[in-house]
Amino acid sequence: MDALLNAVIYATSFLGMLTILVFVHEWGHYIVARMNGVRVEVFSIGFGPEIWGRNDKNGTRWKVSAVPLGGYVKFFGDASAASTPDSDLDKMSDKEKKESFHFKKLYQRAAIVFAGPLANFIFAILILATLFYLYGQTERAAIVSNLVEGKPAAEAGLQIGDKIIAVDGDEIYSFQDLVLQVLYSAGEGLDITVLRNGQEVTVTVVPQEEIITREGEVQLDPNGKPLKAYQIGVQNSEERIFIEHTVGSAVWAGVLHTGTIVKQSLRGIRQMIVGTRSVKELSGPVGISQVTAEAARRGIHYWIQVMALISISLGMINLFPIPLLDGGHLLYYGFEAALGRKLSERTQEFGFRIGLVLVLGLMMVATFNDILKFNW
């Protein structure tokens, strides 16, 4: 019975969140396409056979499809959900060409494609801004109150009373900012700048991966394995900072927080590429469903925070220059701008096939990682 209940929680929390995020992403494409005079034939949540649908006054078919793992908008002139051009484009009348995505100017097509990921970023910023405005921010001051002997921070020369103001040139506003920098370091050296007796001092600290303990007990991850993280051996001040936000400052805080997440995520990807971080950390649908289910158990507030994080990830991943993703289309448009003409259909099709292999390969690796980590 518990297993069935867990399965229901996993499915509903994950699919509910995915549906919202897919709608936001596709709505970005849709609204900018409509602003540029493109006729949108289909707006689908999910793939495959239609479960429910209706036509609006503009002729768009809004529908929910059987496979709820994504979605798409199909523009007039598209041959498929991947926005490949229809073979009959050259037979269109002048009126039809004005409504077709493929006959729009380069900047218009680029704007329509970019609008999907942008909508995910804006959605995340609005979520974070709303939370910051309603609840404010309670942060721990980034002041060193204690150093663990023999650990990287003490060995590098940090001192009790130091106020940490920057890491690798990025400003530090709270102790949590420092924690994130250390966690994402993957053992790479960090240039930590502190304010000491009115003077700025910079030292290089190399984080070490350690098993997390609390009051002498080893902390476990959701699968019952010892929890590991990079640490430098610094304990923070007990001083708390409460930041009460206006609407404007809350939005700006949301923008900064989103930028930090993007930067740290890209850093993690770079570390995987060069080999300083393991690809085993990649997660797919199973792992994400576990995170969303855990957030749902803790309450709607946590579930919404996780939705903001995944929305940022969705927007960022879609901008990767891989054919089949939005970033791949933008890459083609970059070549078009440089060459003064579109790439041949054969070249684009070849690129889409490579993109499909890459995307499926990443999904297989991520899912395999989830299977190994998941507490079956």
Image (spheres, rainbow, N blue to C red):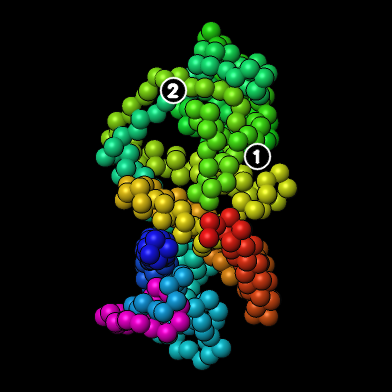
Dot 1, how many residues are within 10 Å of its Cα: few (below 14), some (14-19), or many (20+)? many
Residue 198 percent across, percent down from the top left: 52, 9
Which residue is farthest right? 274
Q: Nearer the viewer, residue 196 or 35?
A: 196
Q: Residue at x 31, y 34 (%)?
A: 136
On residue 186, which mark appears? 1
On residue 238, which mark appears? none
Dot 2, how many residues are within 10 Å of its Cα: few (below 14), some (14-19), or many (20+)? many
**Which residues are drawn in magenta?**
41-59
Q: Is residue 103 above or below residue 138?
A: below
Q: Residue at x 68, y 80 (%)?
A: 346
Residue 167 percent across, percent down from the top left: 58, 29
Q: Nearer the viewer, residue 201 or 359?
A: 359
Residue 106 seen in the current view: yes
Residue 297 percent across, percent down from the top left: 36, 51
Q: Is residue 271 left or right of residue 108?
A: right
Name which quarter of the figure residue 115 lies in.
bottom left
Asked if the magenta segment contains residue 72, the reply would be no
Asked if the magenta segment contains residue 45, the reply would be yes
On residue 141, which mark appears? 2
